[in-house]
Image (cartoon, rainbow, N blue to C red):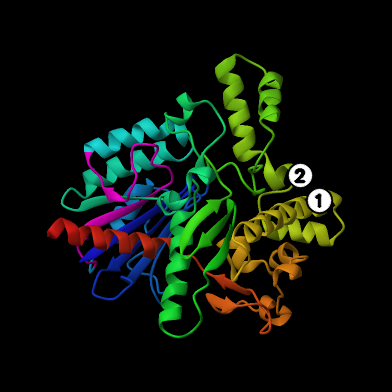
Amino acid sequence: MHLLVINSGSSSIKFSIFASGNAHWPELLYRGEISGIGATQTFRFEDTKGNAVGHAPKDASAEPVELLESAVCGHGMPAIEAVGYRVVHPGPLLDRHQRITEEVLKDLEQAVNFAPLHDPAAIALIREMMQRFPRARHYACFDTIFHHTMPPEASAYAIPARYRQQGVRRYGFHGLSCESIVDELRVASQQGEAQFPARMVIAHLGSGCSVTAVLEGKSVDTSMGLTPTGGVVMGTRPGDLDPGLILYLLRQAEGDRDAALKKVEALVNHQAGMVALSGLPNDMRITRKAAAEGNADAILALKVFTRSVRKAIGGYAWLLGGLDAVVFTGGIGEHDALSRAEILEGLETCGVTLDRAANQASSEKKRRVSALYAQVTVWVITAQEDRMIAMHVSQMELKEDV
């Protein structure tokens, strides 16, 4: 069976084709990306060796879904039998990965208030893909499901019951990323490569950032809450704020109620975080360069960012009663050695010690960067959300065929 996995963002669509078999992981065959949507759009589609597949489109600025369809339905491509989508927020009515029906789409539409920046575009993409691939079965995989194992004291907000009954709680995100890392470490332990860490913290650090506490392979707490805006400081998002500050910003915003809400929503999602502190574009490499040249704002942004992540890791180390592993993933987590070193600085009392040479290396997608004698193993692992989606879709397809 051949599966198409779609992982869409605000300005890009990543897509992959997998072959589902008897192996633990479905086999990746092809991958592609349409980036710069809404601006200077680019397109790529390649096999696992990085070779371009088919002919480059004559017009890379065509509608993204048209580009995607022409790529995966091109000459020599396998017939797509199932499509899996990464959906950020299921809302309170959907509690598992599942096949998409009209009822599921209606439940997702009711969840738009929980994720107004993510879900509307995802729903529109799903509807269009269902029309273009009517013979395939379509599945939604949610970024929150991995965190359903959090205890009530971790997910409940201290607000009146009527809001909690509406589904207002801490959902957590980056769940597919965290799940793929837990699964990879479990497979590694089964193969004798490393001992599976019972007490683990996963730091998913990219444009969006979260820190998750994992006990015996299950999420018990995570930094993001009702939305992906809270938690640690991020590229354009502020992380946790004093609720009174939001009220202050609303009072300061000009215009009527709806205009004020839109202004504050745009501020906390696109104009806050490191870009607000540094005054620079949302790119860690640019911020690092400016800091090295003595830019005080860039230095402050880096200190605020690393401090917030370090506090989260330290807090979860206490919560878990100690640590066996810290895992870094995401664009910053995987590629910025300085961030890893700065975040872990001061955590020696928790048993964390980096191997500086290993931390600087960047060749492997899964590597240990802690000192051999360290009590806590520090890993850098590339998250594989798409393969995780493919695995869930394969499992759901098997149930459909029973």
Q: Marks 1 and 2, Cα distance to the nearest angstrom?
A: 7 Å
Q: Residue 335, how many percent across, how many down? A: 62, 68
On the question of residue 199 being in view, the answer is yes
Label whose residue precedes the other's in the sequence (1 or 2): 2
User: What residue do we see at 53% from left, 72% from top?
Assistant: 197
Report if residue 84 lies within the magenta region.
yes
Badge 2: how crowded within 10 Å, few (<14), some, or many (20+)? Answer: many
Is 352 inside the magenta-drawn segment? no
Q: Residue furthest left?
A: 402
Q: Which residue is mark 2?
A: 277
What's drawn in magenta, residue-wise? Answer: 77-101
Q: Is residue 356 left or right of residue 52?
A: right
Q: Is residue 177 above or below residue 246?
A: below
| Quarter of image, res 53 | bottom left
Residue drawn at x 66%, y 84% as measured from the top left: 372
Residue under the point 68% across and 40% down: 272
Q: Where residue 5 appears, x then y in whole percent?
A: 33, 58
Q: Quadrant of the N terminus?
A: bottom left
The reply to whether dot 1 and dot 2 touch (C-beta < 8 Å) is yes
Q: Which residue is labeled 1 in the image?
A: 300
Predominant SS along the magenta part: loop
Nearer to us in this view, 81 or 244: 244
Which residue occupies the foreground of this view, 175 or 222? 222
Q: Nearer the viewer, residue 341 or 148?
A: 148
Identify residue type, mark 2.
Leu
Left or right side of 117 for 396:
left
| Label 1 Cα neighbours within 10 Å, binned few <14 / some 14-19 / many ≥20 | some
Task: Estimate the x, y position of residue 199 in percent, counting from the top left.
Answer: 55, 66
Q: Secondary structure at mark 1?
A: helix
